């Protein structure tokens, strides 16, 4: 296994995906009008406000994992310079995504809680934010949701590209979608997992906790979830099968995941909470037409936790090519 | 100004981002594919695995010259063959002409000199360890004390002064041959020209330019 990157980068990759996914769900609700169907929309509120802080936390973890860059933080600015490095792309994406997400979240709070505006006006030290609350609120919000979505796709995807370009060194990370399709799997898997964890956070967790019977509002929710779980199962299956067919270190990684050293992480911390458990809950809800608060929160937690362990598993199961 | 975004436009924008990311991938590979433009390496270091006994004198000499802590070296020993007939593959930085460590380094701390030697500018390194992941020879180590990546630098100051890398000087069975690759009369140039000394795992596409191996027949 590779030992250079452990839990900290894994948590960062997860937070990046979760934040990007949550913002994308909020933007979908915004552009498809779901946001305005009811007076209060917890999904959009959480999806807009949480990504900024999540990505700030992720960036702090990234910096903590650095060597010299942690002790001499000005060195971090050098990381903007090499455009052939996917990590440089990531630094740029983060630098753009975080402020856009923070402003989007701020505008969403202003829109959801009109009382926030007079409160802001009454604080002298917050007056500088006037340029934001004096703009046409919903139009400005839509611009930030749109720009944020584009950046979110970038944030969710680049983490996969980051791993897939180290091709010959760690063959498992550059496994293709299928043996004959020259598209790396990791960016695709990470994007789908980002959306899925974003959905788990903003809908299952946030909406259930805030309003309870969320399935009354989004009737197709169980089906959307089952579709996502199905798609992720398919992608993970394709990843493992392609890796096994590739042979060498990639196949070794796949074997360690399915039956070897990482089998517990895979089956107990990823497949069970993120696939089997939410699938059963949503299949049950689809038949019954409703959720209980416990099942909604449980499914959301399971999906989010499984997303974290997925990033960790992909990182630690990277076995260097044999020499 | 009109600032509203329609739902079609939103979908279009996200699709554009996805496509841009997909297009970026081949671009990355393209950048590193112009082999003719790269200057040829001035030096060559050939390791004859048929002579190497795996004694590890090179590993220790490297550690001492570079003042590395106990048990740490720029050279790694890999045991090959089978239990009854083992042989040894000593691996260090191959000084690639197409170094993936330099491609992925976000700060440009890793670079290749005109004479082919790949170096790390420690003042630029942030210690993200991406280069360690990208090196298919796993030739990089991490200097925990200074928080930077580290690796074989071909004992450059000694070599520039007319001396030898520590590993070559220390090699007991004389399995390491060092010389000028740009002098066609030199032993190393002839071994490489004859095809006896080959780069390690050319299929990685990294084009090792200084380290070559005379490999044990298997």
Image: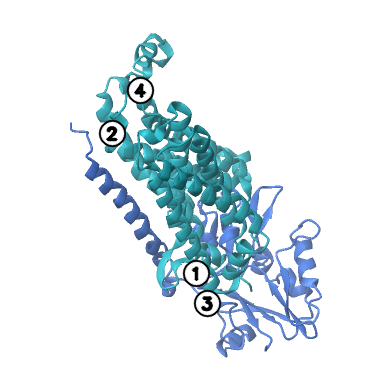
Chain colours: A cyan, B blue
Instruction: Determine if marks 4 and 3 fall on one subunit.
Output: no
Label disc, if present, on residue A142 of the rendered structure = 2
Q: Tag 1, which secondary structure?
A: helix
Q: Which residue is mark 3?
A: B203
Badge 1 sits on which subunit? A
Q: Tag 3, which secondary structure?
A: helix
Badge 3 sits on which subunit? B
Q: Nearer the viewer, residue A201 or A125?
A: A201
Badge 4 sits on which subunit? A
**Mark found first going from the N terminus, 1 or 2:** 2
Q: Give the mark toward the camera: 4 or 3.
A: 4
Residue name at image x 70 percent, y 49 percent: B144
Q: Residues within 10 Å of mark 4 (few under 14, many from 20)?
A: some
**Inter-mark Cα distance, 4 to 1:** 47 Å
**Mark found first going from the N terminus, 4 or 1:** 4
Instruction: Determine if marks 4 and 1 fall on one subunit.
Output: yes
């Amino acid at each position: 296994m590779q030992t250079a990157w452990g839990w900290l980068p894994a948590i960062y990759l997860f937070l990046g995906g979760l934040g990007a996914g949550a913002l994308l769900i909020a933007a979908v609700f915004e552009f498809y009008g779901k946001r305005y169907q009811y007076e209060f929309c917890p999904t959009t509120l959480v999806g807009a406000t949480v990504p900024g802080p999540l990505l700030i936390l992720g960036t702090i973890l990234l910096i903590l994992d650095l060597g010299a860059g942690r002790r001499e933080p000005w060195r971090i600015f050098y990381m903007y310079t090499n455009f052939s490095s996917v990590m440089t792309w990531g630094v740029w994406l983060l630098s753009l995504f975080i402020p856009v997400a923070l402003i989007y979240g701020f505008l969403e709070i202003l829109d959801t809680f009109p009382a926030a505006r007079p409160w802001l006006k009454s604080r002298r030290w917050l007056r500088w934010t006037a340029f934001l609350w004096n703009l046409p609120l919903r139009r400005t919000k839509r611009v930030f949701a749109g720009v944020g979505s584009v950046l979110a796709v970038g944030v969710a995807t680049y983490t996969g590209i980051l791993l897939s370009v180290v091709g010959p060194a760690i063959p498992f990370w550059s496994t293709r979608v299928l043996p004959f399709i020259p598209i790396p799997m990791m960016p695709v898997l990470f994007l789908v997992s980002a959306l899925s964890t974003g959905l788990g956070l903003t809908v299952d967790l946030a909406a259930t906790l805030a309003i309870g019977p969320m399935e009354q509002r989004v009737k197709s929710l169980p089906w959307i979830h089952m579709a996502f779980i199905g798609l992720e199962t398919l992608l993970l299956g394709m990843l493992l099968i392609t890796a096994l067919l590739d042979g060498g270190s990639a196949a070794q990684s796949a074997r360690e995941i399915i039956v070897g050293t990482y089998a517990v992480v895979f089956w107990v911390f990823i497949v069970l909470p993120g696939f089997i458990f939410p699938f059963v809950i949503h299949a049950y809800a689809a038949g019954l037409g409703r959720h209980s608060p416990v099942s909604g929160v449980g499914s959301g937690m399971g999906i989010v936790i499984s997303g974290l362990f997925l990033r960790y598993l992909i990182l630690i199961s990277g076995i260097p090519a044999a020499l | 100004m009109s600032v509203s975004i329609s739902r079609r436009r939103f979908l279009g924008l996200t699709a554009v981002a996805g496509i841009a990311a997909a297009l970026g991938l081949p671009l990355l590979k393209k950048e590193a594919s112009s082999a003719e433009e790269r200057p040829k390496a001035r030096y060559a270091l050939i390791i004859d695995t048929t002579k190497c006994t795996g004694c590890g004198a090179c590993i220790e000499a490297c550690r001492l010259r570079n003042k590395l802590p106990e048990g740490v070296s720029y050279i790694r020993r890999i045991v090959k063959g089978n239990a009854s007939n083992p042989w040894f593959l000593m691996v260090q930085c191959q000084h690639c002409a197409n170094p993936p460590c330099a491609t992925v380094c976000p700060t440009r701390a890793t670079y290749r000199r005109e004479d082919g030697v790949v170096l790390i500018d420690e003042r630029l390194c942030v210690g993200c360890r991406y280069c360690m992941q990208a090196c298919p020879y796993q030739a990089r180590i991490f200097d925990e004390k200074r928080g930077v990546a580290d690796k074989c630098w071909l004992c450059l100051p000694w070599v520039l002064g007319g001396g030898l890398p520590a590993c070559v000087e220390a090699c007991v069975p004389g399995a390491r041959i060092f010389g000028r690759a740009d002098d066609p009369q030199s032993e190393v140039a002839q071994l490489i020209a004859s095809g006896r000394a080959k780069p390690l795992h050319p299929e990685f596409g990294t084009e090792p330019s200084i380290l070559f191996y005379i490999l044990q027949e298997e």
